[in-house]
Amino acid sequence: MFTGIVEEVGLVADVRRDDDVVVLTVRADLAGEVRHGESVAVNGCCLTAVVDGEDAQPLTLELVPETMKRTSLGVVAAGSTVNLERAVPADGRLDGHIVQGHVDGVGTVISRTPGERSEEVRFGLPAELSRYVVEKGSICVDGVSLTVAAVYPDGFGVALIPTTLADTTLGARGPGDPVNLEVDVIAKYVERMTAGYLQGPGSGQEGAAR
């Protein structure tokens, strides 16, 4: 479980294939605090750290074909930067919102409108995710917990504060760039649990949510 509060921006040192597994190597200060088997959110995607021996530098993570197919990590190359967050402890502070690290879809940066210090950014998203996005609700973009400022037929907009622009990769994302999206998990569970009731009599699913 994560919160969408980025701890550090890491530098991808190497990307290589080992049969059907892609091995991602990332240089980051927090690598020294990560143990073998621990979860790390990389651009919002929950990955497992692989530590050979006591030295965790650099951070090594393995990506299977399913991860490559469903996230934007397939475009990451040596020299790319990625948002990193370790799993939050059960007694930790929930600063952002509940983030699983399970990417729901890949969106795209549509436009950026700079202000004096802040910036408004508009993202496109897959049509099947639009029903989970509401104004003033939460959404995770490349591992960053954000508040939805506006909802559009083809996507949504956010307002980025100077800290987010400086301390995450979102400050460098340009129009056309892909981003990982995770919608509010609570909305998905509510939809699933009420689906049988919302179908109405005669649908054959009246008892699905009981």
Image (spheres, rainbow, N blue to C red):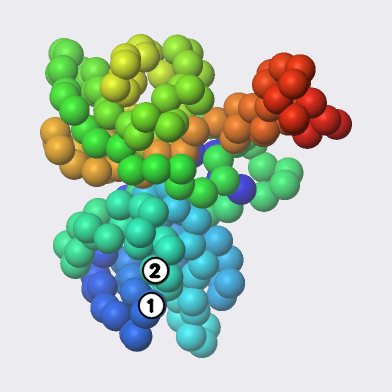
x and y percentages locating residue 203 in the rendered image: 70, 25
Q: Is residue 38 visible?
A: yes
Mark 2 crowd level (few <14, some 14–19, many ≥20, 10 Å Cα): few
The number of numbered badges drawn on the structure is 2
Residue under numbered circle 1: 21
Residue 207, horizontal then vertical, whole percent: 83, 30
Q: Secondary structure at mark 2?
A: helix
| Residue shown at 58% from the left, 66% from the top | 38
Q: Position of residue 83 (x, y in %)?
A: 35, 49
Who is closer to the viewer here, 117 or 122?
A: 122
* Residue drawn at 67 percent across, 42 percent down: 92
**In the picture shown, does residue 208 fall above or below 65?**
above
**Marks 2 and 1: in contact by CB < 8 Å?**
no
Residue at 42% in and 25% down: 130
Task: Give the label, 1 or 2, closer to the camera.
Answer: 2
Mark seen at residue 65: 2
Q: Is residue 165 above or below residue 105?
A: above
Q: Quadrant of residue 29?
A: bottom left
Most foreground residue, 207 or 102:
207
Q: Which amino acid is tagged 1?
A: Val
Observer-nearest of 1 and 124: 124
Disc 1 secondary structure class: strand
